[in-house]
Image: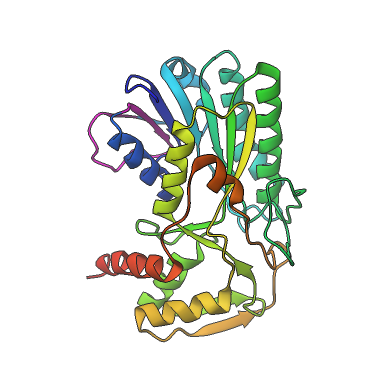
C-alpha cells in the first residue's frame, strides 16, 4: 500500500476528470500536488496547487522527489481543434510530456499513469471490440499525438526501468462536465436542450462508441494507483464495453430528460471514427475492476446535476 507520506502529482487537475481524481486521492489521506493552467477552484484542504500557464512542468521538477506517482491528464486539444494543426499537438501536448519524462529519468520509485485515448487511437473497429494489442490507426492529429506520447513513455520505461501504466479511456461523462467545444457529446446535447437549440450530427448518426461514467473511471484509476504489481509499461482500456450508436444515445437522452431534441444531420468528417468499442477484460482481470453504472443511470445522474446549473 502507498504511505500517506507519498505525494501524488496530478497534471491537468483543474479539468473535469482531474477534479474527480484529485477528490478520490484526497479521500485516502495522501498528499496531492495539483498542477494546472488555471487556479484551482476546489475547496479541499491540504492540496498544494501549482499554476503552470505554459503547460511546461520543467520548473517543478523538485516536486517529483517527494512523489510516489504522477497522473498525467494534461491536454490542450481535441480531435476537432487540432484538425489541420499538427504543431498544436507538438507544442501543446507532447513538449510538456517529454519535459516531464526528462525530469523523471532520475526519479526512481515514481510511476507514471498516463491518460491516453481509446476513442481516437484504434481507428475504425467494425467487427469486434478493440484490445490493447491491436495496432493503433489514429485518424486525427489528436490521436496521433496520443500514440506518439505512448511510444515515448514506453521508451522511457525501457531505458530507465521505470513503471508506466497507460490508460485508454472511452468517452467519459458525468456530473461536473460542462460543455467544451468539440469534446464531450453528452454535455453538448444537454446544453442544446437547455438552450432549445438543434444538435448537429455529423454523418448518419450510426457512429458507435461506448460511454463510461466518471465514478467508474475514477475507481479504475485508484486501483491502478494502488496496484504495486505493475512493472515496465502496461496498457489498459477503460470503458463500459458496450457500444451505443449516436442516434440511440440521443433517443436515451430524450427519455431521460423528457424533452424533445431537434437534430440536424451534416456530412461526416474525415477525422471521425465510425465504430470503436473497447475490450476491457485486461483491466477487469489485472485490477479486479468492473464498471457499475449503466448508461441510463449515468445519464440520469448527469442530467440531475446539469439541471441544478440553471435553476
Image quadrant holding the C terminus, namely bottom left
Image quadrant holding the N terminus, namely top left
Residue 40 position (above or below residue 308):
above
Q: Is residue 198 left or right of residue 126?
A: left
Q: Residue 129 appears in which quarter of the rendering? A: bottom right
Q: Is residue 238 magenta?
A: no
Q: Is residue 37 magenta?
A: yes
Read off the magenta span. 30-48
In depth, the one of 2 and 68 nearer the eye is: 2
Identify the residue at horizontal 57%, vertical 65% (top origin): 242
> What colour scheme governs how the chains and residues are painted in the rendered image of this protein?
rainbow
Dominant secondary structure of the residues highlighted in magenta in the image: loop
Q: Is residue 198 visible?
A: no
Residue 59 position (above or below residue 138):
above
Q: Is residue 29 left or right of residue 116?
A: left
* Residue 36 horizontal/vertical position (percent): 42, 36
Identify the residue at horizontal 64%, vertical 44% (top origin): 88
* Residue 304 horizontal/vertical position (percent): 29, 68
Q: How many marks?
A: 0
Q: Is residue 187 visible?
A: yes
* Residue 47 horizontal/vertical position (percent): 29, 30
Identify the residue at horizontal 69%, vertical 64% (top origin): 273
* Residue 260 horizontal/vertical position (percent): 41, 86
Identify the residue at horizontal 56%, vertical 25% (top origin): 100
Amino acid at each position: 500500500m502507498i504511505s500517506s507520506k507519498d505525494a501524488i502529482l496530478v497534471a491537468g487537475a483543474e479539468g473535469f476528470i482531474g477534479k474527480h481524481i484529485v477528490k478520490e486521492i484526497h479521500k485516502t489521506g495522501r498528499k496531492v500536488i495539483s498542477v494546472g493552467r488555471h487556479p484551482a477552484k476546489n475547496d479541499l484542504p491540504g492540496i498544494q496547487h501549482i499554476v503552470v500557464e505554459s503547460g511546461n512542468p520543467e520548473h517543478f521538477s523538485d516536486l517529483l522527489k517527494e512523489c510516489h506517482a504522477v497522473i498525467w491528464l494534461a491536454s490542450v486539444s481535441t480531435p476537432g481543434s487540432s484538425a489541420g494543426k499538427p504543431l498544436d499537438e507538438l507544442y501543446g501536448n507532447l513538449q510538456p510530456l517529454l519535459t516531464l519524462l526528462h525530469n523523471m529519468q532520475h526519479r526512481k520509485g515514481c510511476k507514471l499513469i498516463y491518460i491516453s485515448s481509446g476513442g481516437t487511437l484504434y481507428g475504425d473497429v467494425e467487427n469486434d471490440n478493440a484490445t490493447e494489442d491491436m495496432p493503433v490507426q489514429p485518424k486525427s492529429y489528436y490521436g496521433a499525438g496520443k500514440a506518439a506520447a505512448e511510444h515515448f513513455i514506453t521508451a522511457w520505461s525501457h531505458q530507465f526501468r521505470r513503471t508506466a501504466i497507460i490508460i485508454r479511456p472511452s468517452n467519459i461523462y458525468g456530473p461536473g462536465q460542462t460543455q467544451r467545444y468539440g469534446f464531450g457529446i453528452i454535455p453538448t446535447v444537454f446544453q442544446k436542450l437547455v438552450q432549445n437549440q438543434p444538435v448537429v450530427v455529423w454523418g448518419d448518426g450510426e457512429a458507435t462508441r461506448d460511454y463510461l461514467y466518471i465514478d467508474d473511471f475514477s475507481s479504475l484509476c485508484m486501483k491502478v494507483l494502488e496496484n504495486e504489481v505493475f512493472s515496465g509499461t502496461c496498457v489498459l482500456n477503460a470503458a463500459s464495453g458496450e457500444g451505443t450508436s449516436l442516434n440511440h444515445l440521443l433517443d436515451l437522452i430524450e427519455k431521460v430528460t423528457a424533452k424533445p431534441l431537434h437534430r440536424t444531420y451534416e456530412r461526416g468528417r474525415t477525422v471521425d471514427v465510425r465504430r470503436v468499442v473497447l475490450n476491457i477484460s485486461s483491466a477487469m482481470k489485472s485490477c479486479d475492476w468492473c464498471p457499475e453504472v449503466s448508461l441510463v443511470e449515468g445519464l440520469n445522474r448527469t442530467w440531475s446535476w446539469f439541471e441544478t446549473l440553471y435553476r
